[in-house]
Amino acid sequence: CLTASSPDIIELVKSERATTGIILSDLQMPRHIDFTNLGNIAFDVYVSSDHPLAAQRITHIDQLKQYRQLVIRSKSAEPGSLNQALSPDIWYADNYYILLELANKGFGWC
């Protein structure tokens, strides 16, 4: 099992290093790749229980900008529209497991 960002998964399937991938659908799919919608997901803010944001009710996006944001990005640094940088302080990772680990350790929000 591989974990990667959506652009990297498309490249893995395109280069035949993977036969199947699950991605966020904000990206243009190459014509020669078959795809289907598996459903929708709700986005939320994830932080450590010790993080200052954990004690707040998030009512506006500006509250998040005060803290380090953890963002997924492909190995080629290609951004996705669902992974926009909102904070001036950003750390990047190339898969969601790393992002959640960083958030759990209190390094920021994702």
Image: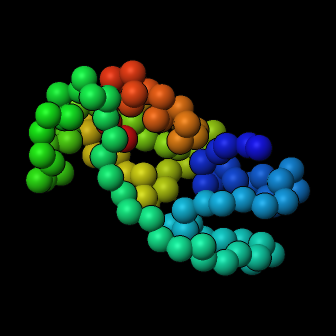
Residue at x 30% of width, y 46% of height: 45
Q: Horizontal and vertical percent for residue 23?
A: 61, 60
> Taking the image as drawn, is residue 15 in sight?
no
Q: Assign the C terminus to one quadrant of the image.
A: top left
Check the picture and name the quadrant holding the N terminus.
top right
Residue 89 to residue 40: above or below: above
User: Which image quadrant is residue 51 in?
Assistant: top left
- Residue lying farthest front? 49
Q: Is residue 109 left or right of residue 71?
A: left
- Look at 38% across and 63% down and name the residue there: 42
Number of numbered discs: 0
Of residues 79 and 24, the one drawn nearer to the viewer in this rendering: 24
Tell me if 57 is positioned left or right of 34 in this view. Answer: left
Q: What residue is rendered at 42% in x and 58% in y?
A: 82
According to the image, what is the colour scheme of the structure?
rainbow
Nearer the observer, 26 or 97 = 97
Could you tell whether 102 is left or right of 3 in the image? left
Please tell me in which quadrant of the rendered image residue 4 appears: top right
Quarter of the image for residue 63 reads top left
Q: Residue furthest right?
A: 16
Left or right of 58 in this view: 45: right
Residue 96 position in % (x across, y down): 53, 41
The reply to whether residue 39 is visible in this rendering is yes
Measured as percent of width and height from the top left, residue 31 is found at 75, 78
Residue found at x 74% / y 43%: 2
The answer to whether 62 is drawn above or below residue 13 in the figure is above
The picture places residue 36, in percent across and down from the top left corner, at 67, 78
